[in-house]
Image (spheres, coloured by chain):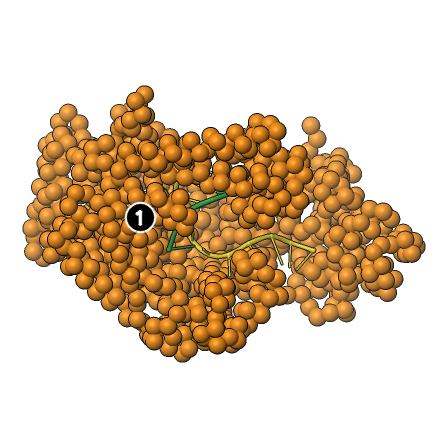
Chain colours: A orange, B green, C yellow
DNA sequence: AGTTTCACG
DNA sequence: ACGTACGTGAAACTC
């Protein structure tokens, strides 16, 4: 095997990392995200390559030859953002400390140095992997030189590799012809002008048929289309110049010996210190376990194994609780470990079609252990032959009464055995971390240790893998002890850090007044569940089954063969190849067969309508009829779904296992399923929803006079909008105009784009643009408000709701137009959606609280974003209506009044 | 594990 | 030249 050299385009990878990794700073406020991303890419590459040599090339600040030539055409390059600029010298220092060779040379770009080194290596028989984000470098690809382009795809970095054949496959030209391609099409990121009117498509076609820019010019008469021909004729010198600009110099005069570039041990003392300063704990852990200081910490963990020790521990705590001077403010990190709730378990379906294995939350839960941290002490206690479960249970009750200040993770999941209330001093750090950054997908103790304590602690996965906790409890006792200690320790230590940040970011009140009380509200809702008529649900499913069978038969007949209708791939082939239906449009992997495409094909073939109906029915059968049935608890005939508080980016609640927030309503057949959701005996359902809460929030937050006035006068907002946008007197507005205006109003809330609106209304982008223009003329403050939000998002990196709920928007920094536009729409939508979420959260806390305080029989069961469902005792109907009206109305006082619709029914279908 | 489709606000 | 409306979750197919 020959030797291998890895070359890295320093600035290009830093740049990529900067835009791909969310903003990171160390405690000195130094931005570190680009360096972090760079290191991750570097380690990934090195792991894959097993290379012998490594070199990183940088550009020097002085204008280069190629750069200078271009300057004569047009201004300067976009300057590097300051946050990135400051990271460059640190990066170089770190590479230096790690003993990694770097090269830079005045008058040459990194490209030229990389090209020169790559060619040199190739000549010496060394194979090369050249890592860069710049596609310019593809011109260097050969069989020995592999160009590697990292791509950040949803947080993960994937690397595209190009040898000669890969370039030809992807771009239909040889590596050297990439230069000609750039000569014609230009490259905005490299400030290469190219030929006006020629883009990627035309450039590729021209080079494919002529081979080069020069050849094409010699046969200029044959160049097609005429537009490109004339442009090339006129701007030929521009093309030649662009080619020169795009050509990488492979003969840069640099001194280089492979010996210097040899890969040695990176893990030096200097590098360790520097990485510590950068606070990259996860990378630090690569530096060997002996360097991490968790060993010391683990030595301080105490494992309580005898009842005697346990009794002493808990009585010590009890004493402290009694001490008047600090008892009540004593901070305790606590985590209770219990058997996995049956709520999460898989269901077994017996032969008789009965679903079994489901316990509801009131069923006695069994406790496996407790982790505790207070002062400098960290303990864990596990249940055993001596320490019985009910002993632990009693201790937990005593502790709860002692009234310490408890901090923990995922509190809602512990409330079934941890007897604390809204009034207790108890804090859920997972919820706190969610407020500080709602974009993460996990808020477990190891995530919080990493993000806020800069510590690497073993995750559940690392300790137990895919094992269930019960199993680990039997076979890996020591790890369970350790696990609980870590949890308690982090719960205690991270509290201050998180609370300080909440304070800093103005979210203390949001946390204390809304999110923490909500934990208890959601727990109540989950524990109550909602009753479902199992027999009726089964019947509904059977009816669907019959219809599905009929349709299936008819579809196979029309198609002339049996195939899987549920497979978009097979369906696409049948529709667009076999039956040759038109509009065979789009998608990455094949034909699109989505409803809006099929809707347009309805007249072409009767099979299309059948497929649409088939889709609808199978959806209802699998997701709702069968899906819901699997969640009905044997013991109480109720479904105990989960309400998740730390999922959405905007602050909304989400619902899972099953999702009770997407039960059908728009189509009558689907809507019927709501009839199986019923109140218990002697109760009815009351369903209360906010009318147009998001538009009202928009009216308030923007302060638009016209919009506010309309709501104050209780006018039909869509009709008014229609009248203004379409220049029609109010009483002449047609139904169609009104529904179009409604779509515009929706669009505004979603962060309007003319394309999106056009798509939704099936009109041209141009027409949609006109609607939007008119809308903004009607409500001028709305436009200003939305513009300000985007501006704020760009300036601060986040936007916020009325109650200061934050939504970071890393997309706004993206160099990619699509991503950035997405960021802009998020900036416009999140404060509105987030404020609406805040408001209904306040309402549900208060409604739940009020019903409990008045000792009423009625209770809150569901929240569906702007709607609350209450199981109401027949004798309490009027009182509950009053409570709903009052608490929902007064949840917040905006410039415009809230309007609440309340309906009553003997099932969810009737009540909505 | 990722994609497509579709249910809701 | 590009290719989208904002926010979710579940099921089924595909690899």
**Residue A136 spot, x, y in % from top left:** 72, 51
Residue A508 percent location from the top left of the image: 28, 62
Eyeballing the image, is C11 above or below A471? below
Whether residue A309 can be seen here: no
Tell me which chain the residue with mark 1 is part of. A
Disc 1 element = helix
Instruction: Kindly identify the residue that appears in the image at 28 percent across and 67 percent down.
Output: A892
Query: What residue appears at the point 54 percent right and 69 percent down from the top-left corner?
Result: A772
Image check: A88 left or right of A459?
Answer: right
Q: Is residue A882 above or below residue A296?
A: below
Taking A638 as reference, is A36 left or right? Answer: right
The residue depicted at 53 percent of the width and 72 percent of the height is A726
Residue A402 at x, y percent in the picture: 10, 49
Q: Position of residue A170 (x, y in %)?
A: 71, 42
Observer-nearest residue: A89 or B9?
B9
Return the residue nearer the eye: A445 or A585. A585
**In the image, A831: left or right of A889?**
right
Q: Residue A145 occupies which quadrant of the picture?
A: top right
In the image, residue A639 sits, relative to residue A97, either above or below, namely: above
Q: Which residue is mark 1?
A: A909
Q: Nearer the viewer, residue A787 or A323?
A: A787
Q: How many marks?
A: 1
Quadrant containing the N terminus of chain A in the rendered view: top right
Q: Residue at x 41, y 35 (%)?
A: A544
- In the picture provided, is A531 more to the left or to the right than A54? left
Furthest residue in direction top, as rendered: A351
Q: Label 1: how many residues lie within 10 Å, few (<14), some (14-19) or many (20+)?
A: some
Q: Is residue A743 visible?
A: yes
Pick the front one: A115 or A834: A834
């Amino acid at each position: 095997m020959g030797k291998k050299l890895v070359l890295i385009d320093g600035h290009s990878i830093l740049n990529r990392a900067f835009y791909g990794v969310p903003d990171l700073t160390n405690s000195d406020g130094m931005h570190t995200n680009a360096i972090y991303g760079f290191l991750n890419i570097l380690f990934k590459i090195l792991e894959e390559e097993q290379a012998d040599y490594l070199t990183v090339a940088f550009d020097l600040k002085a204008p280069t030859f190629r750069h200078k030539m271009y300057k004569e055409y047009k201004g300067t390059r976009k300057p590097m953002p300051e946050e990135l600029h400051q990271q460059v010298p640190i990066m170089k220092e770190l590479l230096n400390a790690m003993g990694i060779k770097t090269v830079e040379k005045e008058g040459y770009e990194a490209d030229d140095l990389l090209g020169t080194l790559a060619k040199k290596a190739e000549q010496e028989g060394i194979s090369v992997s050249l890592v860069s984000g710049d596609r310019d470098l593809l011109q260097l690809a050969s069989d020995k030189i592999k160009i590697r382009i990292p791509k950040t795809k949803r947080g993960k970095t994937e690397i595209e590799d190009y040898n000669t054949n890969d370039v030809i496959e992807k771009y239909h030209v040889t590596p050297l012809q990439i230069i000609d391609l750039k000569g014609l099409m230009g490259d905005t990121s490299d400030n290469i002008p190219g030929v006006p009117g020629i883009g990627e498509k035309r450039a590729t076609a021209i080079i494919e048929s002529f081979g080069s820019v020069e050849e094409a010019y010699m046969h200029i008469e044959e160049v097609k289309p005429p537009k490109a021909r004339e442009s090339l004729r006129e701007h030929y010198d521009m093309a030649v110049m662009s080619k020169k600009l795009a050509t990488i110099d492979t003969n840069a005069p640099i001194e280089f010996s492979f010996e210097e570039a040899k890969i040695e041990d990176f893990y030096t003392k200097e590098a360790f210190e520097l990485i510590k300063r950068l606070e990259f704990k996860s990378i630090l852990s690569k530096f060997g376990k002996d360097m991490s200081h968790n060993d010391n910490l683990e030595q301080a963990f105490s494992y309580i194994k005898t009842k005697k020790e346990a009794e002493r521990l808990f009585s010590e705590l009890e004493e402290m609780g009694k001490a008047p001077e600090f008892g009540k403010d004593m901070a305790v990190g606590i985590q209770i470990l219990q058997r996995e709730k049956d709520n999460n378990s898989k269901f077994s379906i017996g032969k008789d079609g009965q679903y079994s294995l489901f316990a509801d939350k009131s069923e006695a839960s069994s406790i496996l252990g407790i982790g505790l941290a207070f002062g400098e002490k960290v303990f864990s206690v596990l249940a055993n032959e001596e320490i019985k479960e009910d002993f632990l249970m009693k201790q937990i009750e005593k502790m709860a009464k002692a009234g310490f200040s408890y901090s923990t993770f995922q509190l809602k999941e512990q409330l079934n055995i941890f007897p604390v209330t809204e009034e207790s001093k108890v804090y859920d750090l997972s919820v706190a971390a969610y407020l500080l950054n709602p974009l993460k997908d996990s808020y477990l103790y190891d995530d919080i240790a990493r993000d806020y304590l800069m510590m690497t602690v073993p995750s559940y996965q690392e300790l137990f893998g895919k094992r269930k906790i019960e199993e680990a409890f039997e076979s890996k006792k020591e790890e369970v002890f350790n696990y609980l200690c870590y949890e308690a320790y982090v719960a205690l230590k991270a509290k201050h850090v998180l609370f300080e940040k909440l304070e800093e970011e103005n979210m203390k009140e949001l946390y204390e007044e809304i999110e923490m009380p909500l934990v208890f509200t959601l727990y109540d809702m989950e524990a109550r569940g909602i009753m479902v008529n199992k027999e009726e649900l089964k019947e509904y499913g059977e009816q669907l089954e019959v219809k599905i069978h009929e349709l299936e038969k008819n579809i196979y007949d029309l198609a002339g063969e049996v195939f899987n209708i549920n497979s978009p791939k097979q369906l696409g082939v049948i529709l667009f190849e076999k039956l040759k239906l038109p509009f065979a449009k789009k998608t990455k992997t094949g034909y699109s067969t989505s409803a809006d495409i099929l809707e347009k094909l309805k007249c072409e073939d009767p099979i299309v309508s059948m497929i649409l109906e088939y889709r609808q029915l199978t959806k209802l059968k699998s997701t709702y009829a069968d899906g819901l049935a699997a969640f009905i608890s044997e013991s109480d005939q109720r479904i105990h779904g989960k309400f998740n508080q730390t999922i959405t980016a905007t602050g909304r609640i989400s619902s899972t296992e099953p999702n009770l927030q997407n039960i059908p309503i728009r189509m009558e057949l689907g809507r019927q399923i709501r009839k199986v959701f019923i109140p218990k005996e002697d109760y009815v359902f009351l369903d209360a929803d906010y009318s147009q809460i998001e538009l009202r929030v928009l009216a308030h937050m923007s302060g638009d006079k016209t919009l506010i006035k309309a709501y104050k006068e209780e006018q039909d907002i869509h009709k008014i909008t229609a009248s203004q946008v379409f220049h029609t007197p109010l009483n002449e507005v047609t139904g169609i105009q009104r529904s179009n205006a409604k779509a515009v109003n929706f669009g505004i809330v979603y962060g309007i784009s003319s394309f999106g609106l056009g798509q939704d209304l099936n009109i041209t982008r141009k027409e949609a643009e006109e609607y939007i223009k008119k809308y903004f003329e009607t409500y001028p403050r709305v436009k200003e408000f939305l513009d300000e939000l985007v501006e704020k998002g760009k300036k601060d990196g986040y936007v916020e709701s009325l109650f200061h709920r934050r939504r970071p928007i890393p997309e706004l920094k993206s160099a990619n137009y699509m991503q950035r536009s997405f960021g802009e729409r998020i900036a416009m939508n999140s404060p509105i959606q987030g404020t609406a979420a805040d408001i209904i959260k306040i309402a549900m806390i208060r409604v739940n609280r009020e019903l409990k305080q008045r000792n009423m029989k009625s209770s809150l069961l569901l929240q569906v974003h702007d709607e609350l469902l209450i199981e109401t005792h027949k004798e309490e109907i009027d009182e509950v209506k009053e409570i709903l009206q009052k608490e929902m109305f007064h949840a917040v006082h905006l410039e415009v009044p809230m309007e609440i619709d309340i309906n009553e029914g003997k099932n969810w279908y009737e009540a909505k």
